[in-house]
Amino acid sequence: MTELTVLIGKNIRERRIAKGWTQEYLADLMSETPITISRWETAARRVSMEDIHKLSGAFNCNVDELLYPPTPVSASHEKLMKITAQLSSDDVEELLLLARHKISKRKRQTL
């Protein structure tokens, strides 16, 4: 069992639990058995690249998110992500314009 196999298994398990899915549910989505899902999660079995691509589709993430450790997110960043997820795309664009304006204004004040 390699370090990468362990990491991939951990990422699969964390994403599955975060979605509230059982191993049986993920197995049905993947056309696999629950035992295979369990073996992936415990690194008892290597996940093929084909299955990693299928998993990325099931989890609605990119392949890199299954292959690499998650990047820690600060509490304020987490709050911002939750708030912006509730906004329309137009509102997000307006918020970005406001943020850019504030940054530009702050830079001018420090000169």
Image (spheres, rainbow, N blue to C red):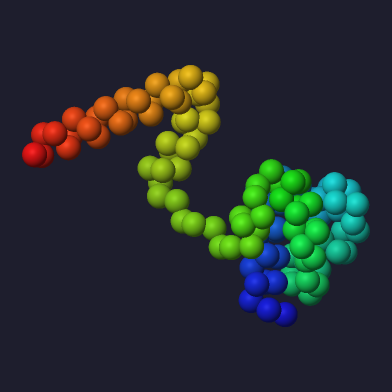
- Does residue 38 lie above or below 73 as drawn? below
Locate residue 28 relative to residue 71 in the image: left or right.
right
Is residue 1 visible in this depiction of the protein? yes
Residue beneath the point at 18% across and 30% down: 105
Label count reads 0
Report the residue that reaches farthest toward the bottom: 1
Q: Quadrant of residue 110?
A: top left
- Does residue 2 lie above or below 59 as drawn? below
- Residue 70 coordinates in the image, percent (x, y): 54, 58
- Residue 42 coordinates in the image, percent (x, y): 74, 70
Quadrant position of the C terminus in the picture: top left
- Does residue 52 lie above or below 82 as drawn? below
Residue beneath the point at 40% across and 50% down: 74
Is residue 24 visible in this depiction of the protein? no
Residue situated in front as seen by the camera: 21 or 7: 7
Residue beneath the point at 47% across and 30% down: 84
Residue beneath the point at 69% across and 43% down: 60
Residue situated in front as seen by the camera: 32 or 24: 32
Residue situated in front as seen by the camera: 71 or 103: 103
Quadrant position of the N terminus in the picture: bottom right
- Residue 6 coordinates in the image, percent (x, y): 67, 71
- Does residue 101 lie above or below 11 as drawn? above
Locate residue 86 relative to residue 27 in the image: left or right.
left
Locate residue 63 relative to residue 101 in the image: left or right.
right
Locate residue 88 relative to residue 27 in the image: left or right.
left
- Residue 87 coordinates in the image, percent (x, y): 50, 23
